[in-house]
């Protein structure tokens, strides 16, 4: 993880330094615009996937808790019918 952060810091520092050079400013502005547009697109998609994942985790835990607290007859009506048919 520290290697990723290091290279991210190097990349940001390089962008800042290249933006200060007068001739490269015309090159850096479109590149920065494309970079941040792509970042916004990526993070927008990741946000919706994150919300979906959070909903799935919460629903799964809710189902687990209900299965741990309720009896089999309350969860599955077919279980009671199956038990009655086995007694008969």
Image: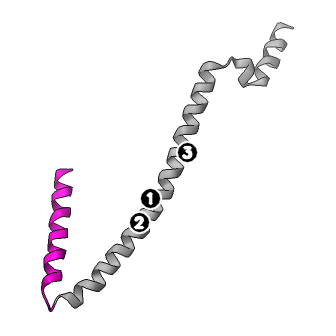
Can you identify the residue that label 2 sits on? 42
The quadrant holding residue 25 is: bottom left
Q: Pointer 1: residues within 10 angstroms few (<14), some, or many (20+)?
A: few
Q: Are marks 2 and 1 in contact (CB under 8 Å)?
A: yes
Q: Which mark is residue 55?
A: 3
The residue that appears at 15% across and 92% down in the rendered structure is 23
Q: Earlier in the sequence, mark 1 or mark 3?
A: 1
Rendered location of residue 77, percent (x, y):
78, 24
Please tell me whether residue 6 belongs to the stretch shown in magenta: yes
- Report how far apart the C-alphas of labels 2 and 1 lie in the structure: 6 Å
Can you identify the residue that label 1 sits on? 46
Q: Which mark is residue 84?
A: none
Rendered location of residue 69, percent (x, y):
62, 19
The residue that appears at 14% across and 66% down in the rendered structure is 10
Rendered location of residue 37, percent (x, y):
38, 75
Q: Are marks 2 and 3 in contact (CB under 8 Å)?
A: no
Nearer to me, 81 or 15: 15
């Amino acid at each position: 993880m520290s290697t990723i952060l290091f290279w991210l810091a190097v990349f940001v520092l390089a962008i800042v330094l290249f933006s200060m050079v007068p001739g490269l400013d015309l090159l850096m502005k479109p590149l920065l615009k494309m970079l941040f547009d792509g970042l916004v697109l990526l993070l927008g998609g990741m946000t919706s996937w994150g919300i979906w994942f959070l909903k799935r985790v919460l629903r799964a835990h809710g189902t687990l808790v209900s299965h741990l607290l309720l009896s089999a007859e309350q969860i599955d009506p077919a279980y009671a019918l199956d038990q009655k048919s086995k007694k008969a």
